[in-house]
Amino acid sequence: MLRWGILGTSFISDTVVKSILASPGSRITAVFGRNETRLDAFAAKYNIATKYQDLEALIDDAEVDVVYVGLPSHMHSSAVIAAAKRGKAILSEKSLATTMEDSHAMIAAVKEANVFFLEGLMYLSHPLMEKVASIARSGVLGTIKGMSGYYAANIWKKANPLGMGTIYNLGCYPVSLVHFIMETAFGPEAFEKRQLTGMGNLSNEGSLHARDASLNVRFDNGVLATIQSTDSFGNDFSFSIQGDKGVLRFKTNPWLPLAGDNIIEIKTYGGATEEIVVSAQMDAFGHQVKRVEDCIAQGLKEAPRPSPSWTNSVSIMDLLTSWENDIKKRAN
Ligand SMILES: NC(=O)C1=CN([C@@H]2O[C@H](COP(=O)(O)OP(=O)(O)OC[C@H]3O[C@@H](n4cnc5c(N)ncnc54)[C@H](OP(=O)(O)O)[C@@H]3O)[C@@H](O)[C@H]2O)C=CC1
Ligand SMILES: O=C1OC[C@@H](O)[C@H](O)[C@H]1O
């Protein structure tokens, strides 16, 4: 039985805790929150016995095997480093961090401590992504030539501005999916070799960050990717993978795959359209908990693909930070 300690009592901890409690292989022994009222309410709601207002105290708790980091993204690095030093396994929310310096420091710490670490890009643990990878490898799309993605959610008033806006809150989803498809189709180096341009609208509320952002990438092998992301309006998604024989489109949200039916459409240029349904027992958060349990039971320190390896998480961050820098460079 895996014993979890939860850092943070916000919306995302609420979601993740429900999946942990639904799993027979896990239980929650402790929760940290800085606000006493919210901490008490959270612990009471989920019947969590031990409450801490001191983050280090939770990490030190001998009854905690795995720490879930549900703190804002600029705090991931310090929490992950502290947990790694105490030998804890770690599941830490996306984005990995908000800077490359923090990203390298946290991955160095988990390597040094030789502990399990997974970034919470939860959709990559869902069986839908295994299916997408098998389609990308099957040849039905031909050679992959391009990808287009869009993610919009009106969350800017709720998201912590120190999490650095839509690029890190939402853009990380299409970028990590482009990363996964590039790796699946062309091998581990293909994503790294590229040129990009970023455009966007900046906000200075709480931090200087992109609120609406678009990205154009040309990978050195000729594949083109276009991504758009906003946290200032809407509630919508799209993602397609274009090959020289056909195109794959997601009919349901690739980044919030469900318990139930998840739907992909493949259209070949000869005219045939096939709908593929991937049915799952659990949503992405449920599969993510199962993945953590399975990895720890097997003594693994990194989760297998489609979940991101440590190197994958750093590569994704490298693109996110380059995207942000390019937008900011144009604004100057
Ligand atoms: N996977 C998913 O679907 C989603 C993931 N996320 C991720 O979850 C994370 C949390 O984001 P968000 O909800 O915007 O963050 P919040 O600002 O709501 O903070 C989350 C938790 O961290 C606590 N916290 C914030 N600042 C501090 C601090 N300085 N010291 C101690 N505790 C602190 C908050 O306490 P308090 O309540 O007192 O403010 C809260 O309990 C991010 O990494 C985000 O990317 C978010 C949404 C969905
Ligand atoms: O991280 C997230 O993932 C799913 C989105 O719908 C949510 O708003 C975002 O914060």
Image (cartoon, rainbow, N blue to C red):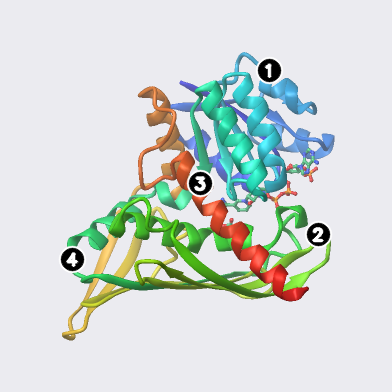
Q: Is residue 202 above or below residue 171?
A: below
**First-in-chain label (3 vs 1):** 1
Of badges 1 and 2, nearer the viewer stands 2
Residue annotated with mark 2: 207
User: Picture coordinates of residue 325 (x, y %)?
Assistant: 67, 63
Is residue 36 visible from the viewing direction of this image? Answer: yes
Which corner quadrant holds the C terminus?
bottom right
Circle 4 SS class: loop
Q: Earlier in the sequence, mark 1 or mark 2?
A: 1
Q: Quadrant of ligand 2?
A: bottom right
User: CA gap, disc 2 to disc 3?
Assistant: 23 Å
Q: Mark on residue 126? A: none
> Hey, what amino acid is under mark 4?
Gly
Mark nearer the N terminus (2 vs 3): 2
Q: Report which residue position mark 4 lands on.
A: 139
Look at the numbered discs 2 and 3 and tell me whether their residues touch, using CB distance below 8 Å.
no
Calculate the distance from the C-alpha at mark 2 to the C-alpha at mark 4.
45 Å
Earlier residue among tags 2 and 4:
4
Q: Residue at x 62, y 13 (%)?
A: 62
Q: Which residue is mark 1?
A: 60
Amino acid, disc 3: Ser
Nearer-N-terminus badge (4/3): 4
Which amino acid is tagged 1?
Answer: Asp
- CA–CA distance in space, label 3 to label 1: 26 Å
Q: Residue at label 3?
A: 313
